[in-house]
Amino acid sequence: MEENKIDIKAFLDADEKKDLLRLLTAGSVDDGKSTLIGRLLFDSKKLYEDQLQALTRDSARVGNAGAGQIDYALLLDGLKAEREEGITIDVAYRYFSTNQRKFIIADTPGHEQYTRNMITGGSTANLAIILVDARKGVITQTRRHTFLVSLLGIKHIVLAVNKMDLVDFDKAVFDKIKKEYLELTTQLGIEDVTCFPISAKQGDNVVEKSERTPWFEGTSLLEFLETVPIHRDRNMTNFRYPVQYVLRPDLDFRGFCGKIASGVVRKGDELVALPSMKRSRVKSIVTYEGELEEAFCPQSVTITLEDEIDISRGEMLVRPDDVPNIGRNFETMLVWMDEELMDRGKQFFLKHNTNTTRATIDSIEYRVDVNTMERLEGKDFKLNEIGCVRITTAKTLFFDAYKDNKATGAFILIDPITNNTSAVGMILRPLEGDETNQIELPTLDLKKLGIAAEHYDAIERAVAELGRQGIEVKVIK
Amino acid sequence: MAEYNLSHLQELETESIHIIREVAAEFENPVMLYSIGKDSSVMVRLAEKAFAPGKVPFPLMHIDSKWKFREMIEFRDNYAKQYGWNLIVESNMEAFNAGVGPFTHGSKVHTDLMKTKALLDALNKYKFDAAFGGARRDEEKSRAKERIFSFRDKFNQWDPKNQRPELWDIYNSRVHKGESIRVFPLSNWTELDIWQYIRLENIPIVPLYYAKERPCVEIDGNIIMADDDRLPKELVPKIHNRMVRFRTLGCWPLTGAVESNATTIEEIVEEMMTTTKSERTTRVIDFDQEASMEQKKREGYF
């Protein structure tokens, strides 16, 4: 046993330096997804023995695996209701780590009515594993999952061709599926795709390379997950800093708290505040540990400025020579997540990073058939439907196209009556001139209205409160 | 060009700070629930980090079941004082005065009244619209599916089949009057992450986590520390000093100790990495009924 003894301090020191990979798994009901995840968890030796014991007990009662065999899938199905149904019903998060990396798996179900769960699970993923059954190849659900992955802008895709044991580890079967899949991903513009022939149930090419696929030149799936570079996937070019919270512990300190949405900021940098367009320089970047010389996405920091500028939550700090779109009209992909049918008469709440505004859906450009990716005629969306719409917001937003900047290109729509998250959006482009609904911001021209100057303060306070409720009013003094 | 990398802990930290600030900005009356355990200790430190150099803009609330380890209470009061927290302590005094306790009423009744009911009453009393909890998704199977912003109806109930979609880092904080959100900023942390962070950040924790000679009795296979004189008399002669520590903290009659010699965080982690039991198995309440934690969560317990 002596050689197995861990040098715990060395272990912890190495563990501290590991980075984090968030991955999404998607597959159809019987593709063996839960088995694959179970094996990644099990074989990476992170399962505690008593969880295994609980598993053996559960297997005896409801397991689907053969007698005496461990049903890895049971490890994953947390909730009582779904265990009875025998299928995963929602997004579940799993954690494991290896000597190289820490992993968070968002495990989502494959069947049609749960597109919204896959979208939920995939929004933060660096990488997606799409499972197919080697006997069935690329099927409709594979196309749908891949389309959703491309919609979410997940940069890396792994195609796991599972159940290779059931096709005698035949290279021709794998090659055919791979070829067909790469045609699909090329069409969708996904650049990084890696394919693996595996058997989740028997472990081939999952953690260890399999001797039964001598023709396969790649690494094992886990080795790939451990080494795929992800830190360059973030936008480190365009500095965007949505102000989240204003910190004023005393008269001398006014800090703007936020999580850097993209890019890098240094002490002394010149920044401009949106929408006021007032400029200043970074006086300090403050954290609990002390001041930083520079900070980068996605760090949470507090920035102080040289000049006293009034900035509130929902406003944004950027560089003067690199400003996002500033406007109230844009075209966007929208995924409908609500049981209730889209109602275009509603004024939704739209939350876009730290900004919340009222918003209306002006027009539907088209819907997308998620199975064929064809564009369909636009009509009101129902649950799990996806398409392109035009939106007008009551407040001015500071945004980028989602493909350039996830953090400033994504938003959610909230139903004003039920408060449900009705839809989520990925912005395509800003709209200008004729393309917009041409509705101007409501304006109060205080002089024209003959309002005395002593009332200006009160009016401005009321307008600020409206702003917090998602409505912008322009005040002219 | 410089490489801008974050370690997994730095990434978890920035995610948690963002969540905590979002709640402070969007809710009128948030509260941070404090269990005095190691996860709470990390959560509290993250809140301190989120608003430094300012003060945390919401209070800390401990639901005292009146059966907590004495060292926990002492630690709680010292910590709150030292770090300037506004600490609220609430208990179900009605049940306590009626003599409810785990030895006389069993763990189910005790937990329902002294923990769940006390918590719900306290949330209603102060009309909190958001409550932070230190739960982690890796702790227990039903938690693996819960959102970071977990919606509760006006009866404080959780409906696992009807959760709001949660995407990117955009959290839906809209609730009607009387409804609320439970917020779990540590959702993505694992047990090892928590220990690692405590070690790196020198976060104070209750000494009960470290092994020491303690007076213990065995009850139904659990090693229970006799923390005060409410231990049933017939058990008193069976008290022996044993070298033990606790992997989770709660009500002393319901929290099993493990035999251990671990007196440093490194030794605790070593024990954890080589142990055969996951942490919740030392909590007696989880074994009450099938899927008991899910049931408790639906009822409003965390």
Image (spheres, grey):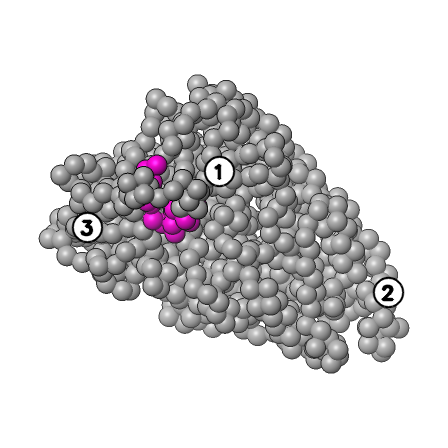
**Residue lying at 65% horizontally and 58% vertically, measured from the top left:** B61
Is residue A19 within the magenta segment?
A: no
Is residue A112 depicted above or below A171 in this figure? below
- Do tag 3 and tag 2 residues touch (Cβ < 8 Å)? no
Which sits earlier in the primary sequence, circle 1 or circle 3?
A: 1
**Residue at the farthest right position:** B237
Res B79 label: none
Q: Residue A46: where, in percent of width, then height?
A: 55, 49
Left or right of residue B281, residue B128 in this image: left
Give how far apart the Cα atoms at labels 3 and 2 are.
75 Å
In the image, is residue A69 above or below residue A443? below
Q: Label 3: which residue?
A: A362
Callout 1 touching callout 2 (CB < 8 Å): no
Occupied quadrant, residue A125: top left
Instruction: Name the residue beneath numbered marker 2.
Output: B240
Question: What's the residue type where badge 3 is placed?
Answer: Asp
Q: Nearer the viewer, residue A61 or A119?
A: A119
Q: Is mark 2 on a helix, strand or loop?
A: strand
- In the image, B271 versus A355, the foreground residue is A355
Q: Which amino acid does label 2 sit on?
A: His
Q: Is disc 2 on the same chain as disc 1?
A: no
Question: Where does the magenta region start and end?
Answer: A461-477
Q: Is mark 1 on a helix, strand or loop?
A: strand
Closer to the eye: label 1 or 3: 3
Q: Can residue A143 be seen in this view?
A: no
Q: Name the residue under label 1.
A: A258
Q: In the rendered structure, which amino acid carries the disc numbered 1?
A: Gly
**Residue B208 falls in image quadrant:** bottom right
Q: Is B252 placed left or right of A14 in the picture? A: right
Residue depicted at 35% across the width and 44% down the height: A451
Q: How far apart are marks 1 and 3 (CA)?
A: 32 Å
Coordinates of residue B199 in the picture (x, y in percent) = 68, 40
